[in-house]
Image (spheres, rainbow, N blue to C red):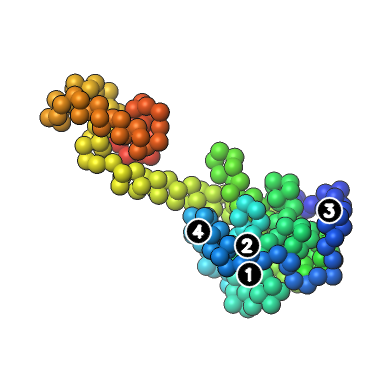
Amino acid sequence: MNFLCPQEELSFSYKQCIEIGIDPSIIFPLILLNQEDLQKRIHINKELIEAFHMSVEEEWVKGEYLFLLTDIEGYLLDVKCSTKEKKCIKDSGFEPGVSFREESCGTNAISMAMRLKRVVYVRPQEHYCDIFKKWHCIASPIMVGNGEIVGYVDISTIDKKIADEVSMVIKLLAEKIAVEYEKILKEKEINEIKIKLNDSQTKILALEAKGYKKLDIAEALGIEVVTVKYHKRKIVEKLGVKNIKEAVIKAIKLGLVDVD
């Protein structure tokens, strides 16, 4: 498989585990968030979790594959799999709030994807701790359009080799989650701005986008020029930009105004 982890990278990870002092015989993760901290992370990453649910097809989770989502720091946010597989991973101590970092469960696909910032496939014998000795895992960063990594997605099987085509599925899945995530954020931003702007400010933005000057806007809306100036200041403030030009650019980008 193209995404097998190079031996030198595995060796480096094993060395890190030894320096940390993690026992290779552990059968449960060592780090689990308390409920309060877990709920905070779930709230912070609610759009990412929603995108994950929208992207993983229900048909996919009826078989032996496990789909895991973690935040940027490797904490498990959600799992999608069959009832049988869900019981299996719960019995192994994997539940939302578990850390996949090396100090929690040794070398694994998510910890390696976090280190290398790319897709990584780790076979059972390549894991450092016994907890993963039956696991075949492939993990990928979830990278949005500006290159920022917002989380990690993992496809795993227990006691079954991962099919070669899954190496392509993981990339497509990570991309799909990223697209849905950005779409959700954009819709949220649009809704928040619509709530902030009153009717006059929306109309002023639309006229600004068409190139209207202050006097023209005032005449078109039947208001004073000073009122137009006031609303422009409020628009800039509410959209979190530096000036009205940037406000128009942002409004057009978000689809808030029609320039036709």
Q: Quadrant of the C terminus?
A: top left
Label located before the other in sequence (2 or 1): 2
Residue sitting at 21 percent across and 37 percent down? 200
Q: Secondary structure at mark 3?
A: helix
Residue position marked by numbered label 3 in the rendering? 16
The amino acid on which the numbered mark 3 sits, given as a three-letter code, is Gln
Task: Give me the C-alpha separation between circle 2 and circle 1.
Answer: 7 Å
Residue placed furthest toward the left: 222
Going by the image, does 42 lie left or right of 110? left
Label located before the other in sequence (3 or 1): 3
Residue 217 seen in this snapshot: no
Please say if the residues under marks 3 and 1 sit with CB atoms less than 8 Å apart: no
Residue sitting at 62 percent across and 51 percent down? 72
Going by the image, does 77 lie left or right of 184? right
The amino acid on which the numbered mark 1 sits, given as a three-letter code, is Glu
User: Of the numbered discs in the image, which one, if any, rests on residue 74?
Assistant: none
Seen from the viewer's position, the closer of residues 247 and 163 is 247
Seen from the viewer's position, the closer of residues 242 and 112 is 242
Residue position marked by numbered label 4 in the rendering? 43
When the figure is inspected, residue 43 is found, relative to residue 92, above or below; the finding is above
Task: Give me the C-alpha separation between circle 2 and circle 4.
Answer: 13 Å
Residue 99 seen in this snapshot: yes
Residue sitting at 14 percent across and 29 percent down? 223
Residue position marked by numbered label 1 in the rendering? 95
Q: Tell which tag, 2 or 4, sits nearer the viewer.
A: 4
Task: Give me the C-alpha separation between circle 3 and circle 1.
Answer: 24 Å
Residue sitting at 60 percent across and 55 percent down? 71
Label located before the other in sequence (1 or 4): 4
Please say if the residues under marks 2 and 1 sit with CB atoms less than 8 Å apart: yes
User: Residue 252: where, in percent of width, then height?
Assistant: 35, 34
